[in-house]
Image (cartoon, grey):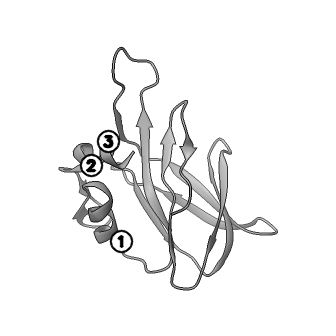
């Protein structure tokens, strides 16, 4: 997915962060947090002739602390698809507005990357 995004995002400024994105390396450069979750949100056309292109998509997610699913808040990715949230160490669940969720754990000093592709395809990426 990062290869498809790198060319599409090369010229787009990350408004919220004042940087630019071009694949994984520059996404890491755009981070302003040192602990928590971040990622890119994309949309892939699922009805197309030939190769289907993916592009950035702004999405809103809810965050819940586990195990009790205590509401932590929401985050909306920029129109370029970048989001980040500083979080304390612990277990969390992140969900789309249509309740497609994934659980993850933040360790002390750790950044967890979770990308989301809105299409018929994979949805949440695996934590890295």
Task: Give the residue at x 66% y 45%.
Answer: 100
Q: Position of residue 9 (x, y in %)?
A: 26, 48
Graded by Cα atoms within 10 Å as few (under 14), some (14 to 19) or many (20 or more), the crowding at tag 1 reads some
Q: Position of residue 41 (x, y in %)?
A: 44, 48
Q: CA distance from mark 1 to mark 3?
A: 20 Å
The answer to the question of whether label 2 and label 3 lie on touching residues, with beta carbons closer than 8 A, is: yes
Q: Which one is earlier in the sequence, the residue at label 2 or at label 1? A: 2
Q: CA distance from mark 2 to mark 1?
A: 16 Å
Say which mark, if any, is on residue 4.
3
Q: Which one is earlier in the sequence, the residue at label 1 or at label 3? A: 3
Above or below, 44 relative to 106: above
Tell which residue pokes out farthest to the left in this image: 11
Task: Give the residue at x 28% y 59%.
Answer: 15
39 left or right, relative to 123: left
Q: Nearer the viewer, mark 1 or mark 3?
A: 3
93 left or right, relative to 69: left
Residue identified by numbered label 1: 31
58 left or right, relative to 75: left
The answer to the question of whether label 2 and label 1 lie on touching residues, with beta carbons closer than 8 A, is: no
Residue identified by numbered label 2: 6
Q: Nearer the viewer, mark 2 or mark 1?
A: 2
Q: Quadrant of the N terminus?
A: top left
Above or below, 31 relative to 55: below
């Amino acid at each position: 997915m990062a290869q498809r995004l790198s060319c599409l995002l090369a010229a787009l400024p990350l408004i919220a962060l004042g940087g630019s994105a071009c694949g994984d390396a520059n996404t890491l450069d755009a981070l302003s947090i040192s602990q928590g979750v971040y990622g890119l949100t994309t949309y892939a056309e699922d009805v197309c002739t030939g190769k289907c292109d993916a592009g950035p998509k702004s999405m809103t997610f809810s965050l819940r602390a586990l195990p009790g699913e205590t509401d932590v808040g929401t985050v909306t990715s920029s129109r370029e698809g970048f989001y980040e949230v500083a979080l304390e160490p612990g277990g969390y669940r992140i969900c789309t507005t249509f309740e497609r969720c994934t659980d993850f754990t933040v360790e002390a000093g750790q950044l967890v990357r979770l990308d989301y592709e809105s299409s018929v395809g994979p949805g949440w990426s695996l934590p890295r």
